[in-house]
Image: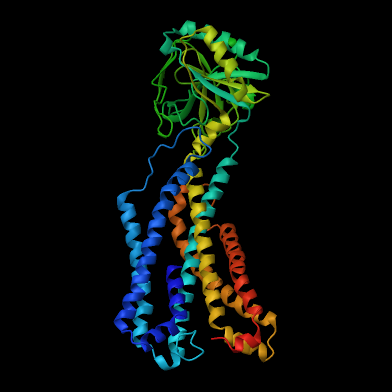
Amino acid sequence: NVAGLLLSRAATRQKEMAVRLALGASRATIVRQLLTESVLLSVLGGIFGIIFAYWGVHAITALMSGGSNQSFAYIIAPDWRVLSFVLGASLLSGIFFGLAPALQSLHLDLTPALKGNASTFPGGARRRRRIHLGNTLVVAQVALSVVVLTGAGLLVQTLENLRSINPGFDPHNILLFGIHTRDAGYKDVQMEDLYRNLREQFAAIPGVTSVGYAMDTLLSGDLSSTTVGIEGQPKESDLPVDVLTIGPDFLRTMRIPLLEGRTFTPGDFRPASVESEGSKAGNKKGTGGAGQTSATASAQVRVLVNKAFVRQYLEKRNPIGQHLVGGWEIIGVTGDTKYTDLRRTIHPMLYLPLTSGDAQFELRTAVDPMALIPTVRQIVRQADSNLPLVDIRTQTEQIDELLVRERTIARLSSFFGVLALALAGVGLYGLLSYEVARRTREIGIRMALGAHRRDLLRLVIGQGIVLAIVGAALGIGVALGVTRYLNSMLYGVHPDDPLTIVAVAALLVVVALAACYIPARRAMRVDPMVAMRHE
């Protein structure tokens, strides 16, 4: 846009330069004047850009952290190296694009330039080159905007695909919070009594329909895993499985379907001597790792497995009653659910009864879950004022936190994609406006010879649409090669998704039409008599 504006500005000042030269100004003076003006405009633009940048970084930070309860984890502020680079780019653009018309003034022919029709560059070949350069700049800008918009479209579609994933349970109207009993000095037997009493009191809260708890919450970023063996199979200890330790009514609260067998009964939660050493992965949110567990048994522990476990490890065998190495007996099969995050594929999974350790409670409600927080705090405080209540949030908020990265990138790419498209529209508008102004006399002659206004409309819009189509074609070709580098960030959409490309192309045509319409309307309103006398 800077190049196009400076070139158009220089084209309209040819007569002015001719008058200055005719009055005795040296060509070196003309060059110095044009360069000074260009550099001054560039410096002023850079200064205003810095002021805008200080506001913009705060806006972008708010944009990236929007929708999350946590503050943005990174410090973003204008940096002297960034500002130096931008100021240098502004200055160089002014010098580079201001130098071409300045040097051209050295070869200006005063006689035709001082004549009445001096609003264009003298010399047909030179004029065609100037128009060709302006067209090239617009085509390049349109192509770049197509590349950015295509990437933005793919990332936005990825975010929507992740949001629309069925996690295998109902995440709506669930309040989550953790109770760290170990920090308060509770023993295993005390924990069992505490959890039972708390469940009863939580279930009595008006608006609460069911209460469950587990060692981890689903889609929290945490993961526990182990390896198991199935008795009667040759390989007895090398089958990887995810592990989630749950309390009573967890499946009903999360609305995870039970496909076969039965769920846990109160007798399944009696303390057993089966302990999972290191069953907790120790992975905090965002680490994406998985720990390993090993089990030794001196008592039978009943477990549930998911459908993926049956499909991968038991094939066509009846899972109910199957025994796992270590003293585990399968009593039921549940539906498949996402565990640690939305992108991770569903793995074979074991549900163990929780008999000790800290718990994460889940309260399904018929009202707004956040409205129950004061009541929950009061119940926990009455049970034990030393019990820490942590990580209070809803299940939907927890899922949103998982998508912070995707949402941030989608928002930023969309913002810069729309900005690039707007700049391309401004560039196209500027070029066509200059063309209409330059060809005012020609338009008047055409109208005097019988051209209709719709012909002029078609002439101007046709030129803009051709440039937009050429730029879009080049941009699509580049986008097909560039977007494959986004493959690791995409989910449920291919880098060369035709729907996204068609949508970007359609949007570009709409913007191009809007950018062409105003110059075209200006051409239609040209008065032939005035145009014939136009300088």
Q: In this view, does 88 lie above or below 401?
A: below
**Foreground pick, 5 / 172:** 5
- Left or right of 120 in this view: 34: left
Q: Is residue 138 above or below residue 62?
A: below
Q: Position of residue 438 (x, y in %)?
A: 53, 82
Question: What residue do we see at 31% from left, 56% from top?
Answer: 84
Quadrant hosting residue 446: bottom right
The image shows a total of numbered marks equal to: 0
Scheme of image coloration: rainbow
Q: Where is residue 41 in the image (x, y as percent from the top left)?
A: 39, 66
**Foreground pick, 150 / 438:** 438
- Left or right of 173 in this view: 429: left
Asked if residue 477 can be seen in this view, the reply is no
* Extreme-bottom residue of the structure: 111
Question: What residue do we see at 41% from left, 37% from top?
Answer: 73
**Foreground pick, 304 / 431:** 431
Asked if residue 154 can be seen in this view, the reply is yes
**Foreground pick, 404 / 100:** 100
Q: Is residue 338 above or below residue 492?
A: above
Question: What residue do we see at 62% from left, 71% from top?
Answer: 518
Q: Position of residue 259 (x, y in %)?
A: 64, 27
Quadrant hosting residue 16: bottom left
Question: What residue do we see at 36% from left, 86% from top?
Answer: 21
Q: In this view, does 373 lie above or below 511?
A: above
Q: Position of residue 288 (x, y in %)?
A: 42, 35
Quadrant hosting residue 249: top right
